[in-house]
Amino acid sequence: MPRVTTTLLKEKKARKEKITMLTAYDYSMAVMEDEAGIDVILVGDSLGNVVLGYDSTLPVTMDDMIHHTRAVARGARNSLVVGDMPFLSYHVSIPEAVRNAGRFIQEGGAQAVKLEGGVERVDTIKAILDAQIPVMGHIGLTPQSVHQFGGFKVQGKDMETAAKLIRDAKALDEAGVFSIVLECVPAPLARRITEEVSVPTIGIGAGPDCDGQVLVINDILGLYKGFTPKFVKRYADLHPLVAQALQAYKEDVESGAFPATEHCFAMKEEVLEKLY
């Protein structure tokens, strides 16, 4: 199977084939997602919540992201790996944004980057594209702007905000992004945006009419005990299974049941006797 490219994603939209995208933060999970044929693996700044234990994505640093992106890239042979640009990595200046985007490619091994924002990010996006780095857009509920939004709320429910999202999507499309994530957007609005832009839309809480879907891997596997959004479908409930395995291990060690003979290495008796 050839590696998924940004061009292939656009071709899938043209053929009306759905795009699959999931987050991953380490080598082992990247291997499994890659083997499952997931089109795009996003090394999301959501690692702040589900891996690093923060209350939001805001404390995540570039070094955090590069560390995890590098691990994911080593495990993904065919999936397109996208590095999520964290808070303040592209907000201070355009030259700094380009350098940070370049780190994802040069140090992290990613093939593209994702950043949040619409019309206000066009100049930054164009500069990153000028550096030959593909960019995925992200509009709607943008978690790095959670304080500005006043919390995690669905975006685009009224005329003003809906019109802005349409303008943002068209501006990103014209700027040259290869796809756009739509997060927490009413399904009818997401459908209209999908119809009006030339690049694929990837929905997360944006209904079934987007060109693809993305979710956080810890959410769909039931590994994260924190808040689970309405739009998440849980495909497994692994937390109780893992907890049960850990408890069984603890009991076996404390009782002496582990390690058993089959878990031990033997040596010749005559060698052992010579040690005394």
Image: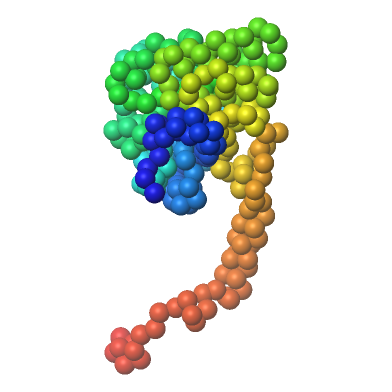
Q: Position of residue 54 (x, y in %)?
A: 55, 33
Q: Position of residue 22 (x, y in %)?
A: 52, 40
Quick one: 4 or 74, which is closer to the camera?
4
* Residue found at the far front of this picture: 15
Rendered residue at 39%/49% (across/down): 1
Q: Quadrant of residue 110?
A: top left
106 lies above or below 151: below
Q: Quadrant of residue 225?
A: top right
Q: Position of residue 221 (x, y in %)?
A: 61, 48
On the rendered image, what quadrant is the C terminus found in? bottom left
Q: Position of residue 24 (x, y in %)?
A: 49, 42
250 left or right of 101 in image: right
* Residue found at the far bottom of this picture: 270
Quick one: 10 or 98, which is closer to the camera?
10
Rendered residue at 29%/21% (across/down): 131
Circle count: 0
Q: Quadrant of residue 86?
A: top left
Rendered residue at 37%/45% (across/down): 2
- Rendering colour mode: rainbow
Quick one: 44 or 182, which is closer to the camera?
182
Quick one: 18 or 28, which is closer to the camera?
18
83 left or right of 194 in image: left
The answer to whether residue 48 is seen in the rendering is: no
The answer to whether residue 26 is seen in the rendering is: yes
